[in-house]
Image: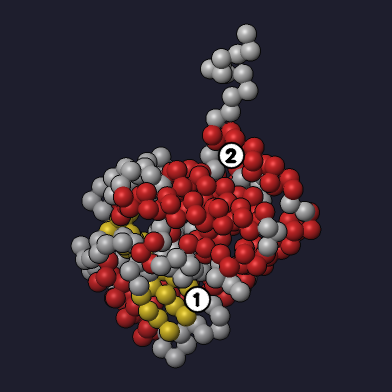
Amino acid sequence: MGGSGNGTFGYRSPDELRNLVRKAEDETVSAAFEAELADTLGSLLGDANARDVETVRERLDEAKAALQDSIEGSFDLLFGGSVAKHTYVDGLSDIDSLVLINDSELHGEGPQQVLSRMEQILRQELRGRAEVSHGRMAVTIDYGDGMVLQLLPAMRADDGRFQVPSSRRDGWSRINPDEFQKALTRRNRECGNKLVPTIKLAKAIVGQLPEAQRLSGYHMESLGIAAFRDYAGEKTTRAMLPTFFERARELVLSPIKDSTGQSVHVDEYLGAENSEARHAASHILGRLARRMRNATAAESTAQWRALFGLE
């Protein structure tokens, strides 16, 4: 008569229970702390984003002219004026310029040969005015006045799609930069223009991890697009940052699909679905999400700052 316990009345799934608990926790956070945390995150973004856009454009044009004069072929600049810089591999939303190389003497060469040639040309052109170097994916120009620009080379593959240096191996990864940028822009707009700032902050946190544990910049952006599909929560970085890590914890267990025009190999470095590497990444993302939730529950901006490597 009293019920056997196998009915559905009052049943809540584990996800629903977690959401109820998080909602209750969030509601107990004081308005003063919310304002303090928002100010802290805004300050971190402000430090990254404060740039002289006109000077950025002038310097990018100068770099473009140097490359055009020294290498036979055509170069186009995309994504000029993007802002954030991090301590590890960036994604398309952070690169100042995607240098599209067509029919040049570099066609058929590997990424390191292309990057070395670009570095050589730009170092000669900017001698005495900037330090030029290259990593696995991009050429970095440090002007010494606080401005650092990054140029990502792209070569057209036989199928017409562009390929950029892989973040984890000595080879090329195919992408559709235009479609990917449109997908990221669309999702960012759906989230009240808070997705890109959230991804930038997420990258800054992941950048504090040992290099072997970091997800690539492209992968982080792809996860962001997927994590906030049909997002109906609060559109603030304070709310979206832990949500990113919580949802990415599940999404990272499977390879990214080519639904945005991004390369299907964006996360090939983690192996097949449910691989050991994917479970390790999932564990790390979940741990970071818990640290954020704990920091908020304790109303501790110090704990939040520690996530970014700040005292």
Q: Quadrant of the C terminus?
A: bottom right
The answer to whether residue 112 is left or right of residue 150 is left
Residue topped by disc 1:
148
- Looking at the picture, does residue 120 appear above or below residue 100? below
Q: Is residue 122 left or right of residue 160?
A: right
Q: Which residue is mark 2?
A: 18
| Dot label at residue 262 | none
- Is residue 141 in sight in this rendering? yes
Residue reaching furthest to the left: 108
> Which image quadrant is residue 190 in?
top right
Q: Quadrant of the N terminus?
A: top right
Closer to viewer: mark 2 or mark 1: 2
Callout 1 crowding tier (Cα within 10 Å): few <14, some 14–19, many ≥20: some
* Marked residue nearer the N-terminal end (2 or 1): 2
| Residue 83 in view | no
Residue 195 screen position, x and y as percent: 58, 51
